[in-house]
Image (tube, rainbow, N blue to C red):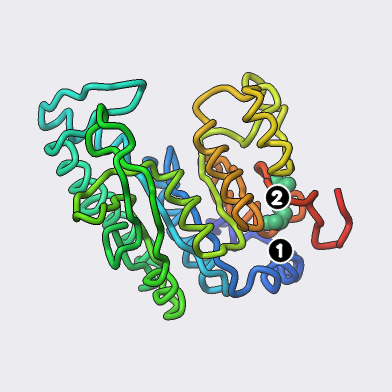
Amino acid sequence: MTRGTTESARTDPQLTAKLLTEVLPYIQRWRDKVVVIKFGGNAMIDDALAATFASDMVLLRQVGILPVVVHGGGPQIGDMLRRLGKESVFEDGLRVTDAETLDIARMVLVGKVNREIVGAINMHGPLAVGLSGQDAGIITAKARDSRLGFVGDVSAVNSTMIERMLAEGLIPVISTIGADAAGQAYNINADTVAGAIASSLGAEKIIYLTDVAGLLADVDNADTLISRITSEALRASLDEGELVGGMIPKITAAVEAVEHGVSSAHLLDGRVPHVMLIELFTDSGIGTLITKEPYTGSDGVES
Ligand code: ARG
């Protein structure tokens, strides 16, 4: 480092002004638009990345975007079960959730992970409010399969409370516990919940933070990133079983959200600092953009 200055202080002030001018069309375009972000993977586990995510949330809110954060916490639940010496049983790769496991999952998701995200965002501006899907009836759940215990699926979303919070300028941070009509709680996959909440809100965007660059034409080759694809093309690949790997639930949720009216879904690499700013405020973006119609850029040119 030269003359003991920080990186940003060394940046040419003219360049800073030029950058701000370049993002203006996007700031105008996304103003007052709801953007649902599924927060997870490395971005949530790595402290430095989580801190960057938190400040980006406040930045998005301050430029007029309405972010809604949805999070899971599978690895953190697994850690706590191990610390408590509770053995997990798996069926088809899914953890069987008995009453005790459900209690632990709720404590970890609502009591720990949610609090950490809210706390990290609020260091940059007192805007984040934590909610569980049980609050104000946001997520009505149903059992997925009796063999899995209290693993749920979304049966309905009531986004009234989320809309009220957005109208107050707040950033809702939602953990993915839902309840059925009898009040029984369920742990629900966060990718699915994020998609369902985005559809219910009529969101502009749903963003999935993953641990890969995006959708790859060849899963073993990071250079084969698909930058843009229509939901129709992706649905066809899903139906024909052309896609493989752990991304399928995320891809399915993203495609469904676009089919249900969300303007665009983005699969982004949460390991890249400020990945959302790069995606939202540049023409070329950085991850995979999924839209219903072939994408029209800010220049109005179809590609
Ligand atoms: N910034 C624009 C948007 O948020 C374009 C992003 C393009 N992204 C891509 N992966 N091709 O819609």
For the point 30% across and 63% down, which residue is it? 137
| Quarter of the image where one finds residue 31 | bottom right
Q: Amino acid at mark 1?
A: Asp
Which circle marks residue 291 in the picture?
2
Q: Of all residues shown, which one is farthest toward the bottom?
A: 168
Residue 271 locus on image (x, y percent): 51, 40
Disc 2 to disc 1, C-alpha distance: 36 Å
Lateral position of residue 93 relative to residue 22, left or right:
left
Query: Residue 6's spot in the image, x, y percent?
Result: 54, 57
Residue at 16% in and 34% down:
98
Mark positioned earlier in the residue sequence (2 or 1):
1
Q: Amino acid at mark 2?
A: Thr
> Residue 85, percent across and down?
10, 26
User: Residue placed at 61% from the left, 43% from the top?
Assistant: 255
Secondary element under disc 1, as helix, strand or loop, is loop
Position above or below: 248 against 298: above
Residue 141, horizontal then vertical, whole percent: 32, 49
**Residue 118 located left or right of residue 61:** left
Q: Residue at x 22, y 42 (%)?
A: 105
- Where is mark 1, residue-wise? 12
Res 285 visible: no
